[in-house]
Image (cartoon, rainbow, N blue to C red):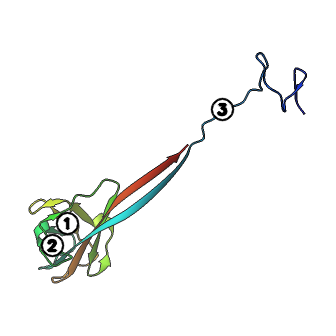
Amino acid sequence: MAQLRGHSMLNTKWRRGDCMALQLIKLFVAATTTTEVAPDVARFFYITTAETAEGATLTIDAASFLQDDGSQATQLPALATNNSYFNVYINGVLQMEGISTYTPGATGVGSLSITVPTGSGSIPANTPVVLEIVQFAPSSNTTVTT
């Protein structure tokens, strides 16, 4: 058992001048964070009216798209930085990112442009094009206990 100036440390009252061993005094803090990520998906549909040849660009204005409910779109939503993405499907097939350019905005500004790569064949008339936009609305709740 440890001794302090000749006294047992157990059952001993500290007197002025007695020393206590050095200790590190720390706060105890615990935190729990719960994060939920809710995707917000919007789909826009278009049927091509003419063939788009290899090397050409098909540009679809916002007002040319139909929304999921069948109503005409009036604008394409802005994409949240680092928290959203878009996919383009032509005739039901997901396309590579590098062939399309998305511009948010209302009619006359908002559009989807698809550049048909040389050597890949054309996009025939009456081909469905689907624009899918996925945005995330994350929310976090932190509980701190001390």
86, 140: nearer the viewer: 140
Report crowding for label 2: few under 14, some 14 to 19, many 20 or more residues within 10 A (C-alpha): many
Splitting the image into 4 quarters, where does residue 52 fall? Answer: bottom left
Callout in the foreground (1, 2): 2
Amino acid carrying label 2: it is Phe
As drawn, the residue found furthest toward the top would be: 17
- Seen at 29% across and 81% down, the residue is 92
Callout in the foreground (1, 3): 3
Q: Are marks 1 and 2 in contact (CB under 8 Å)?
A: yes
- Between the residue at mark 1 and the residue at mark 2, the CA separation in whole angstroms equals 10 Å
- Between the residue at mark 2 and the residue at mark 3, the CA separation in whole angstroms equals 65 Å
Splitting the image into 4 quarters, where does residue 78 fall? Answer: bottom left
Question: Which percent across, then down, holds residue 17?
Answer: 77, 15
The residue carrying mark 3 is 25
The residue carrying mark 2 is 65
Does residue 95 sit above or below 25 in this rendering? below
Whether residue 48 can be seen here: yes
12, 146: nearer the viewer: 12
Does residue 126 sit above or below 7 in this rendering? below
Question: Which percent across, then down, holds residue 119?
Answer: 28, 75
131, 101: nearer the viewer: 131
